[in-house]
Image: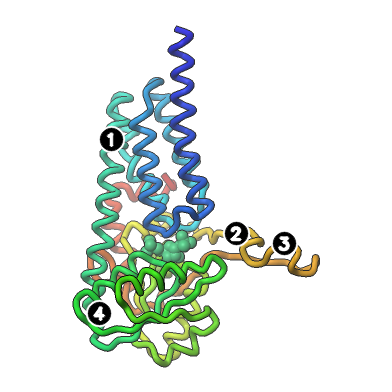
Amino acid sequence: MLHTIKSQKDTLVYVFDTVKETASDIKEMKIRGAGRIARAGASAMRDFAENYQCGSLEECRKDLDTAKDILLGSRPTAVSLWNGIHACIRDVESAPSRKEAMDSVIRNAGSFIEMSSNAVELIAKIGAKRVREGDTILTHCNSSAALGVIKEAHAQGRDIKVYATESRPWRQGLLTVKELSEAGIDVTLIIDGAVRSVMKKVDNVFVGADTVASNGALVNKIGTSQLALAADEARVSFNVCTETYKFSPMTMFGDMVTIEERDCGEVADEGVLPKNVKIYNPVFDSTPAKYIDTIITELGIMSPGSVYDVMVRQLGEGIFRAREGK
Ligand code: RI2
């Protein structure tokens, strides 16, 4: 008996350790990108459910809730993570037994991961139609949805050029230029401050999304709003490539999107600046809907004004849960 209790405890420690490991990888940006962190979160919930072998239905619900909170505590801005994890646990409340609760998490996590990967492919196919022969494109940071569009247009034979921003302080732009050059695309790295300067040579801007609010505003990597303003000034089309699970149901009911602030050490090494200098390091910014020409999703191309209707349709009865933030 003693042995069983010990091994149950060991199992619990193990399942929580793996969830904590994923949360820490997301926090430290070993896993990054709004879509990837959502899939990693869903995958962690699936592992948790697969290895959870003890406790009553009530205990399992409580432990799933704790696992959810650990994962959601990793990064606050991308609603993709929130939506991904809630998709996994949506049938737990109504499950009649522990086994059925955990089976539903395993099933729902698998469906979410599959849907999420398929959505990126669909966005690439749909968005590529908006890229014309000879276009010069500007992209920011490192978005798999936006890069999917660019790579698909190139794969379909269009001759294109791309400017990619460095995206300080994490410099995800280096990942972008590597990925695009490996795909055989003519790509030029620019510093973030060069955006307005190159905009006159640009035909189309494609960026990703961490969250889209119910009023159509885009929350994406810091500096995105500068691209949008410069594009507006130069009459260049500004396009957001996003899966619809990056639409935030909570914003329908008044919640604001939390903008993550990260460590000062990401901006300047300790000891480099005089002691009285402060550092402010916001990771994302918000681009108002009026600067956005298209939102390219797996459901098709829409205007920012359609986001609310799509959310209502997709949430169905879940709209009441969203209102409670559940
Ligand atoms: P995909 C990234 O955030 C960028 O802001 C990027 O635009 C967004 O996620 C969407 O990426 P971070 O994790 O889901 O680098 O399109 O902070 O890959």
Left or right, residue 281 beside residue 65: right
SS at mark 3 in the image: loop
Amino acid tagged 1: Ser
How far from the left and from the top, in percent, is residue 16? 47, 33
| Tag in front: 1 or 3 | 3
- The residue lying at 51 percent from left, 74 percent from top is 223
Q: Does ligand 1 reach within 8 Å of label 2's beta carbon?
A: no
- The answer to whether the residues at label 1 and label 3 have Cβ atoms under 8 Å apart is no
- Per the model, the C-alpha gap separating discs 3 and 4 is 45 Å
Left or right, residue 13 beside residue 46: right
Residue 270 — which label? 3
Residue that mark 2 sits on: 262
Amino acid tagged 2: Arg
- The residue lying at 40 percent from left, 46 percent from top is 41
How far from the left and from the top, in percent, is residue 76? 51, 54
SS at mark 2 in the image: loop
Q: Residues within 10 Å of mark 1 (few under 14, many from 20)?
A: many
Q: Is residue 213 visible?
A: no
SS at mark 4 in the image: loop
- The answer to whether the residues at label 4 and label 2 have Cβ atoms under 8 Å apart is no
Residue that mark 1 sits on: 104
Amino acid tagged 4: Arg
Q: Nearer the N terminus, badge 1 or badge 3?
A: 1
- Per the model, the C-alpha gap separating discs 1 and 3 is 47 Å
